[in-house]
């Protein structure tokens, strides 16, 4: 059977229209199935931005009775599209209502075998005294063409859990104390 030019165009048009109708029917069925699949939790859910590396990833935070019960990447967020780096994925573990998180500083005295809880004021005073004593005992001043005042007895290592603003303030404080050895975990 030979098909003429007009018949070819008629059959092509009919096949295209049929394919389009089938595609629309399947697309409507898929959209209905997706609409019935609700990804939101039945408990209170809010949105937040990851505080760690400054890229602005979005997260969904689920709370129940005023406590965070789940944190996960927001699939609708344009930056991370539901994904989470290791720091972002650990936000739930670092939340204030985590019963396993330490709430007070702990200290083991020299020669001691037991840890003891300290109040924050006492712990910060102890840290400040030790920094001051070490800095004073190892202070260096070089005079020549320029004046260099510093200590090489203390170093500072920033952690990956710090965000950009915290790293900036930490760096300024350490430089103000005269530290030379200032490093960050991300470079190591």
Image (tube, rainbow, N blue to C red):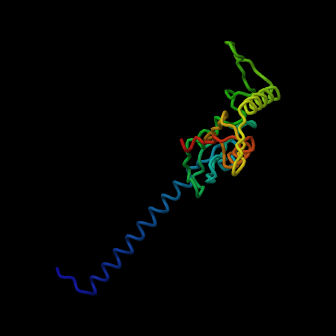
Vertical relation: 41 (above or below) 98: below
Q: Nearer the viewer, residue 134 or 23?
A: 134
Q: Which residue is situated farthest in the left direction here?
A: 1
Q: Is residue 96 depicted above or below 20 in this figure?
A: above
Q: Quadrant of residue 126?
A: top right
The relative height of residue 51 versus residue 77 in the rendered view (above or below) is: above
| Along the viewing direction, whichever of 9 and 42 lies nearer the viewer | 42
What quarter of the picture does the N terminus occupy?
bottom left
**Residue situated in front as seen by the camera: 69 or 177:** 177
Q: Position of residue 113 (x, y in %)?
A: 67, 12
Residue drawn where x is 68% and y is 29% of the image: 101
124 sits to left or right of 180: right
Q: Position of residue 124 (x, y in %)?
A: 79, 30
Q: Name the spot of residue 131 as percent of width and height, x first.
A: 74, 31
Residue under the point 81% across and 26% down: 122
In the figure, residue 161 lies in which quadrant? top right
Q: Is residue 156 above or below residue 47?
A: above
Q: Give the total of numbered labels.
A: 0
Q: Nearer the viewer, residue 16 or 64?
A: 64
Judged from this view, the residue extending furthest toward the right is 121
Left or right side of 36 for 138 = right
Q: Position of residue 146 (x, y in %)?
A: 70, 50
Q: Is residue 79 left or right of residue 104?
A: left
| Residue 58 left/right relative to 23 | right
């Amino acid at each position: 059977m030979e098909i003429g030019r007009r018949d070819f165009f008629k059959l092509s048009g009919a096949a295209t229209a049929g394919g389009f109708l089938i595609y629309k029917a399947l697309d409507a069925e898929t959209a209905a199935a997706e609409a019935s699949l609700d990804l939101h939790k039945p408990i209170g859910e809010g949105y937040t931005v990851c505080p760690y590396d400054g890229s602005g990833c979005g997260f969904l935070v689920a709370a129940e009775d005023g406590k965070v019960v789940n944190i996960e990447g927001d699939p609708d967020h344009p930056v991370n599209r539901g994904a989470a780096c290791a720091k972002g994925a650990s936000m739930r573990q670092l939340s204030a209502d985590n019963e396993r998180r330490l709430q007070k500083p702990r200290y083991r005295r020299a020669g001691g075998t037991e840890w003891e809880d300290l109040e924050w004021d006492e712990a910060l005073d102890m840290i400040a005294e030790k920094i001051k004593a070490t800095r004073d005992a190892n202070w260096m001043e070089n005079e020549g063409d320029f004046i260099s005042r510093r200590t090489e007895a203390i170093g500072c290592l920033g952690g990956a859990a710090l965000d950009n603003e915290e790293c900036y303030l930490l760096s300024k404080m350490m430089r103000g104390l005269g530290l030379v050895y200032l490093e960050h975990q991300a470079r190591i």
